[in-house]
């Protein structure tokens, strides 16, 4: 899924820390081998090759992942859409440097995109594409799914204090550092150099953030974001940053994309109906005149945000002197 994973934990046993680290990297590699669209041998790539011709039976874990993706597509009325693979390629966001497609190209992509064209059959644990050219892209939910899988292992091993990070866009906290109420996470302001938007303390929950600062391209002075609106087939405009906290990392990952695509007033309704236990802050508008919309956000917001808020990853810093285990790109050797 093209990201870097990190693990921080507290332990007095260096050998135990290494053992746990190795287990987590093995698990991340296993999930990558299932879901990465950067690996031709992955189960997701196999589905992309075959599902337009006939139903493809897959393993229980991949089917559960696809079911989660379908759930958030339905809940968001398509704002989250795992079938945007061709759309990302057309705009040059898959292994290239950006490209503005023609109307003809977008018309073709329209026929090759849409979560309603994906059919899941729970009885046979199979998936079928109803339109040729459909291509799944796990980018908006896969990191969270990997975080949940890794957290399950840590809990099973009795770990009581750990922080997992997937490229800093999705983090999952187990417990808290000793003598702290949670893992300290700084949510940055959308404008680099400004004071932080907020500081949260994460404990047994996940936070995911979406923004356009880390992956975009600029042409004729206009910045094109990598987060697509499946309805318009174009990069999202008028959004600066979204951060959402949820007990489940798969959900927080998907929701961060949903809230970035939807208008703030629509996002509040989706959260109230489908994720009432979540907390979120949405920064829309432009960098000079931002508007902050919050949903159950209890942490203090910066003064710039506090004066404009409506109610209904950037680089994240970690507090505490945890034993930092080496970050690793999926696919690296142990």
Image: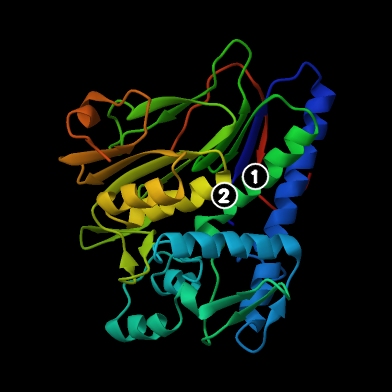
Q: How many marks?
A: 2
Where residue 148 is drawn, which disc sits there? 1
Residue shown at 20% from the left, 58% from the top: 221
Please tell me whether mark 1 sits on a helix, a strand or a loop: helix
Which of marks 2 and 1 precedes in the sequence?
A: 1
The percent coordinates of residue 3 (x first, y second) are 57, 50
Residue 299 placement (x, y as % from top left): 37, 25
State the residue position of label 2.
250
As displayed, is residue 188 above or below residue 56?
above
Helix, strand or loop at mark 2: helix
Question: In the image, what residue occupies the spot 76% across and 66% down?
Answer: 59
167 with respect to 329 (left or right): left
Q: Quadrant of the C terminus?
A: top right
Nearest the camera: 233 or 223? Answer: 233
Apparent side of residue 66 relative to residue 276 in the rendered image (left or right):
right
- The residue shown at (37%, 34%) is 296
Q: Viewed as shown, does residue 186 lie left or right of 268?
A: right
- For the residue pair 53 and 224, the one nearer the viewer reads as 53
User: Dots 1 and 2: beta carbons under 8 Å?
Assistant: yes
Q: Residues within 10 Å of mark 2 (few under 14, many from 20)?
A: many
Res 103 → quadrant: bottom left
Q: Is residue 52 visible?
A: yes
Marking on residue 7: none
């Amino acid at each position: 899924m093209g990201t870097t994973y990190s693990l921080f934990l507290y332990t007095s046993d260096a050998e135990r820390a290494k053992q746990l680290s190795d287990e987590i990297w093995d698990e991340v590699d296993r999930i990558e081998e299932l879901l990465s669209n950067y690996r031709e041998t992955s189960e997701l790539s196999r589905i992309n090759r075959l599902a337009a011709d006939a139903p493809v039976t897959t393993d229980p874990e991949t089917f559960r992942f696809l079911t989660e993706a379908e759930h958030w597509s339905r809940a968001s009325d398509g704002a989250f859409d795992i079938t945007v693979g061709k759309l990302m390629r057309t705009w040059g966001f898959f292994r290239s440097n950006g490209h503005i497609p023609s109307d003809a190209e977008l018309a073709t992509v329209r026929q090759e995109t849409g979560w309603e064209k994906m059919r899941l059959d729970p009885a046979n644990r199979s998936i079928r594409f109803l339109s040729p050219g459909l291509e799944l892209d796990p980018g908006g939910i896969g990191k969270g799914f990997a975080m949940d899988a890794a957290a399950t292992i840590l809990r099973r091993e009795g770990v009581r204090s750990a922080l997992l990070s997937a490229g800093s866009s999705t983090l999952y906290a187990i417990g808290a550092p000793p003598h702290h109420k949670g893992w300290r996470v700084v949510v940055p302001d959308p404008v680099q150099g400004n004071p932080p938007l907020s500081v949260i303390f994460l404990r047994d929950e996940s936070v995911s953030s979406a923004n356009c600062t880390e992956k975009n391209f600029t042409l004729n002075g206009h910045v094109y974001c990598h987060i697509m609106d499946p309805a318009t087939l174009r990069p999202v405009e008028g959004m600066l940053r979204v951060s959402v906290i949820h007990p489940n990392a798969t959900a927080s990952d998907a929701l961060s994309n949903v809230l970035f695509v939807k208008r703030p007033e629509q996002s509040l309704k989706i959260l109230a109906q489908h994720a009432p236990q979540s907390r979120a802050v949405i920064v829309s508008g432009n960098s000079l005149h931002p508007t902050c919309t919050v949903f159950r956000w209890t942490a203090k917001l910066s003064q710039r945000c506090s004066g404009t808020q409506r109610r209904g990853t950037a680089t994240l810093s970690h507090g505490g002197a945890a034993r930092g285990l080496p970050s690793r790109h999926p696919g690296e050797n142990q």
